Image (cartoon, helix red, strand yellow):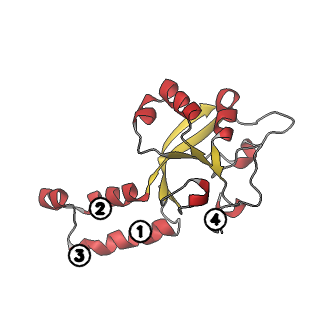
Amino acid sequence: MAHFTYDVDKFDKDNLHQGDLIKRTPNVEKILESIHPHYYENKSNKYFIVITQSCDLVKREGVIKSRYVTIAAVKPLKNALERELEQLQYDNLEKKLNFCDISRRTKLFQFAERLFNNNEQEYFYLHREPNFGLNEDHCAFLRLSIALRTDIHYDTLLEAKIIQLKESFQ
């Protein structure tokens, strides 16, 4: 059974929606290589998530309202946790040994709790779903976004769509 945030029963193969998870396919790689080489080279961006509102992306009589579809980088969850840990480390010794003082550990746990509950503004947690190719927990880094032209890239992104969020989580 799929995670409760994913909509496997109403998976829309014809339209992109906010929250759709896009796999890094060879065609997506071509887009990244030509338009955003940094995103192409950064292989920790294993997936991308659509952050443009669904109402602007649904085809109506073959026409898409939005000229652009914005996608954000999706990385393994450990990347977000490591980034937060770096913020809590005060000196080079903590950074070198990859730990933080126990007095700040509570902040790391609180961050993780907000992340898992999707209450952390800069991130969106995506629970692993091996049946759809998401083999480990991931996190969308919402500030790491790029805009792509819908008239050129919409269909490529649609072909690479592997997971759709339920409407209440979009």
At horizontal 51% and vertical 26% (from top left) the residue drawn is 35
In the rendered structure, find residue 5 and report the number of the disc placed on it: 4
Question: How far, Cα to Cα, is label 2 from label 3?
Answer: 13 Å
Mark 4 and 2 residues: CB-CB less than 8 Å, in contact?
Answer: no
Badge number at residue 112: 1
| Type of the residue with mark 1 | Ala
Kindly identify which numbered label has been placed on residue 137: none
What type is the residue that disc 4 sits on? Thr
Residue 116's x, y, as percent? 49, 68
* 140 sits left or right of 131 in the view: left
- Lower sequence index among marks 4 and 1: 4
Q: Percent from the top left, x then y, of residue 36?
A: 48, 30
1 or 3: mark nearer the eye: 1
- Gap in Å between the C-alphas at discs 4 and 2? 27 Å
Residue sticking out furthest to the front? 131
Q: Nearer the N terminus, badge 2 or badge 3?
A: 2
Residue at position x 59%, y 40% from top?
70
Q: Residues within 10 Å of mark 3 (few under 14, many from 20)?
A: few
Q: Which residue is mark 2?
A: 85
| Residue 103, numbered label | 3
Q: Marks 2 and 1, Cα distance to the nearest angstrom?
A: 11 Å
Mark in front: 4 vs 1: 4
Q: Is 44 left or right of 73, judged from the image as shown? A: left
Nearer mark to the viewer, of 2 and 3: 2
